Amino acid sequence: MKGQIVFLFVVVPWLLYAQLNEVGAEVADTKYLEDQFYVGLSYNFIRDKPDGISQQNLSYGLQFGVIKDIPLNKTRNVALGIGVGYAVNSYYSNLFASQADNTITYAIASDSVGLRRGKLENHLIEFPLEFRWRTSTPEEYKFWRIYGGIKFGYVFSSRFKFVTNTDKIAFSNGNNTNFQYGLTLNFGYNTFNIHTYYALSALFKDGTNLGTTNTPIEFKPLRIGIIFYIL
């Protein structure tokens, strides 16, 4: 009987303690990965606008996708991120385009046009490449992060949409640059992080000009917003 009592009060607690340690070891995953999904919202500034072109309304962007997190050191707070995602970006301005016989002519909207809203909308498949530094640990889910890199994009749909006093006009933009790329920097703490994208490529092909002055249209976006990382 005494032996059974010793077993209950000494051996059983020791076994339970060992089991808890094993569970704790499983929770503290030393092979953890971070930030494998993302979603972001941005305001899209237009850089390198020709004289007379101005932004109007709210130019916005939406992006989401998945990233493969590849740790580069033992503590896993330095990593490489390679991903794929989708983005839609809208640019509102007083740039007016008209189409005739598959030819698009560009001009600054005059008062006679009665332009109320003019938008260029691009849909892209994106491929982000990030160098990642963070203060994460296997037990810490709130941490600082700084992710810098480059993002490539392929525009699979580009459309103009105009609303005037009398008409609603929409047609495809055949003069967009299909392959686009730029520098990215994402940084912040825990849930909310700042997202920036500085385009190195133009939205329009070389040779796309304003018809009235023959001035090149060299729109380059600067996107600033927020990005959320999940898992």
Image: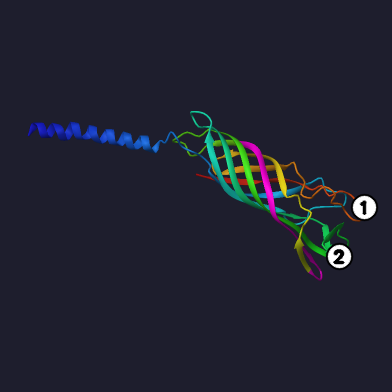
Q: Position of residue 16 (x, y in %)?
A: 25, 36
* Amino acid of disc 1: Thr
Callout 2 crowding tier (Cα within 10 Å): few <14, some 14–19, many ≥20? some
Q: Position of residue 80 (x, y in %)?
A: 57, 35
Task: Choose between 43 and 210: the one closer to the eye.
Answer: 210
Q: Position of residue 199 (x, y in %)?
A: 73, 43
Q: Which mark is residue 113?
A: 2
Q: Position of residue 218 (x, y in %)?
A: 82, 47
Question: Dot 1 corresponds to which residue?
Answer: 213
Task: Choose between 93 and 98: the one closer to the eye.
Answer: 98
* Amino acid of disc 2: Val
Which residue is at a point 30% across and 36% down the rendered structure image?
20
What is the magenta segment's predominant secondary structure? strand
Q: Quadrant of residue 185?
A: top right
Number of marks present in the image shown: 2
Q: Does the stretch in magenta take in 154?
A: yes
User: How are the colours assigned in the image?
Assistant: rainbow
Give the side of residue 194 with respect to residue 74, left or right. Answer: right
Which residue is at a point 60% across and 42% down the rendered structure image?
193
Magenta range: 147-167
Give the side of residue 208 with respect to residue 43, left or right. Answer: right
User: Residue farthest to the front?
Assistant: 101
Image quadrant where one finds the N terminus: top left
SS at mark 1 in the image: loop
SS at mark 2 in the image: loop
Q: CA distance from mark 2 to mark 1?
A: 18 Å
